[in-house]
Amino acid sequence: MRTFRTRTTTAAATALLAALSLTACQNGGSDTGAAAPGATSTAVPAPAGAATPVGAARPGTSGDQAGTAATPAGGTGKGSTGGNGSTGKDGAGSAKPKPASPAAGGGTSDPASFTTCTSANTKVTVSRPSRPINHLLITATNTGTRTCLAYAAPLLRFDDEQSTPRLVESSRPQAVVTLAPGESAYAGVILSGERAPEEANGRVTERLSVLFNSRDESGSVGAPTTVTLPADTYKTDDAAVTYWQDDLADALMY
């Protein structure tokens, strides 16, 4: 009985060893170094701030975009050229406004090259035009060597009168009349107004003194020029004079 139990135990042990050997042989066909059951491959994230290798695709980009930095839509890089072709220092591509260019010819003329028109540098004549009636025409011609400015209107005095005729304000030009040597300015004199001569104190006059206005129109400059009027020049207290004009027709349109 004891011998039978020993044999039975030995046979069982031998069978167990054989089963283990068979299992080992079957597992021997697997690749060496295979991962253990249940193990997974986990990617280790790169440390924050680590540079991406040149030519390597960044996360979320395709292979043909590797190594190319994305540019926001419509944006420009630092120092890039903006839509108007100017390079901005701040990378915005916008150009700073250019300073205004000087006027052609070097700017305005030198004021020292001008002088005020006076009896010393102009010749004054008075005539009676055929049209319109009851008018006189004053002509001032620059006889000097410098350009002169005829400010405002001529200041007139008939005979020994103390008062001067009123000004036709609607005749004021947009700019001061400028006379180069040899050029002329014109002013029209309206001898009578709407009132009848007997109502406006009419009379025949013989002489007319002409003075030039100052720049600030505060009074006359220079000596007067006195001329003899055409015969039978009749004027009233309603007489008026226009501002200096650079065109004869403009002086006689009032």
Image: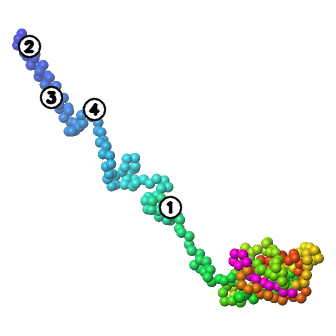
Q: Which mark is residue 139?
A: none
**Does 190 appear above or below 87?**
below
Query: In the rendered image, is residue 102 in sight?
Result: yes
Q: Quadrant of the N terminus?
A: top left
Magenta segment: 206-219
Distance in Å between CA atoms under marks 2 and 3: 25 Å
What amino acid is labelled 3 in the image?
Answer: Ser
Instruction: Name the residue located 72 percent from the left edge and 73 percent from the top edge.
Output: 174
Q: Please provide percent x and percent y for residue 36.
A: 24, 34
Which residue sits furthest top? 1
Residue at 33 percent of width and 51 percent of height? 52
Q: Are marks 2 and 3 in contact (CB under 8 Å)?
A: no
Whether 113 is among the magenta residues is no
User: Mark 4 or mark 3: which is in front?
Assistant: 4
Which residue carries the number 2 mark?
Answer: 5
- Label at residue 94: 1
Mark 2 residue type: Arg
Residue that numbered label 4 is attached to: 38
Q: Residue at x 66, y 87 (%)?
A: 146
Residue 160 or residue 245, whichever sits in front = 160
In space, the residues marked 4 and 2 are separated at their CA atoms by: 43 Å
Query: What amino acid is labelled 4 in the image?
Result: Gly
Q: Residues within 10 Å of mark 3 (few under 14, many from 20)?
A: few
The foreground one among 107 and 37 is: 107
